[in-house]
Amino acid sequence: MSKKGWSLVALTIIGIIICYSYVTVSNGPIEPLGRLAFVKLMNPDMYPGHPHSVLLSQEAQNVGSKCVLVLQLYGGSNYRSYQEGNVFIIEVAFIDTQGEGSISLSQVNFLDSLKVALFGVPPNRYEYMSDGTVYPNYDAMMAHVETLAQEHGQQGPLPMVFKGTVRVGNPMITPGEGFPAYFQILTNTYGIIPAWIYTFIGLFEPYFHDPYAYSELSNYTQWQDAYNQGLLDKNYVQVNTTANHELTQLYRNNDATYDS
């Protein structure tokens, strides 16, 4: 067969895989929306009025949903769920029982990542934190998520994002917080092939939907340094002079109205 013929066969196979994945996910209970953002703008980074929280609420409303699930890496919060406008945001963080998770490329176990990509997340590897409770396995966590969604009037598939913020390193390379749990949920719900497709596509979502993407990527080292020094904390007293002034003002407005 000629090179052109092989190319046609390859394109046909890829097309079939993409169509299969689209049909499978379109009829399922989870609607993958991809990555939310690139870097943390404020800390805590998900609470009523926070720019990324408002963005997430808007994304959920755009697909006609009353609830949305955001996945993160456990970092010590209680990850409480809350109302943002007309949308109830369900927060879940995964805890890797075999390590701290992939915080930056320097800490990634590539062999382990390859095994996960090929075969999915091993059962019982992760625990989960949501609303102040540690859920010991996937089924218990998803039961909690489904209960919250039902209690808040969810109808149809539940939209899902991984927060995607990167504390250290280049956010254009590192996928960020919640990425492994996002892949796990897609794998468990739709199978490994649709999970590959939608996880890969989801990496590019902030370029199209995050209005702060340019500031986040252009100044990501400054944002990360400010976060790591505590300058983005909710009770901070110093103004990060390298931060975007508009976002700094948004922070102050949120700080004055947030009921902790």
Image (cartoon, rainbow, N blue to C red):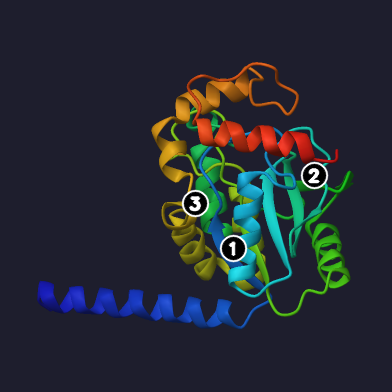
* Residue neighbourhood size for the residue with mark 1, other residues' Cα within 10 Å, grouped as few (<14), some (14–19), many (≥20): many
N-terminal-most mark, 2 or 1: 1
- Quadrant of the rendered image containing residue 112: top right
Report the mark closest to the observer, 3 or 2: 3
Mark drawn on residue 210: 3
Residue linked to disc 2: 79
Q: Position of residue 46 (x, y in %)?
A: 70, 44
Residue furthest left as drawn:
2
Structural distance between the alpha carbons of marks 2 and 1? 20 Å
Query: Which quadrant would residue 228 be assigned to in this image?
Result: top right
Residue picked out by circle 1: 59
Q: Is residue 197 above or below residue 225?
A: below
Would you say residue 101 is visible in this rendering? no
Whether pointer 3 and pointer 1 mark residues with C-beta atoms closer than 8 Å, the reply is no
As shown in the figure, which amino acid type bears the numbered disc 3? Asp
Q: Quadrant of the C terminus?
A: top right
Rendering coords of residue 186 (x, y %): 61, 65
Residue type marked 1: Glu
Task: Say if mark 2 contacts mark 1, CB within 8 Å.
Answer: no
SS at mark 1?
helix
The location of residue 221, given as percent across then percent down, is: 46, 25
User: Which of the two discs, 3 and 1, labels the residue nearer the N terminus?
Assistant: 1
The secondary element bearing badge 3 is classed as loop
| Mark nearer the N terminus (3 vs 2) | 2
Which one is in front, 232 or 177?
Answer: 232
Cα distance between the residues tagged 3 and 2? 22 Å
Q: Does 151 appear above or below 110?
A: below
Q: Amino acid at mark 2?
A: Tyr
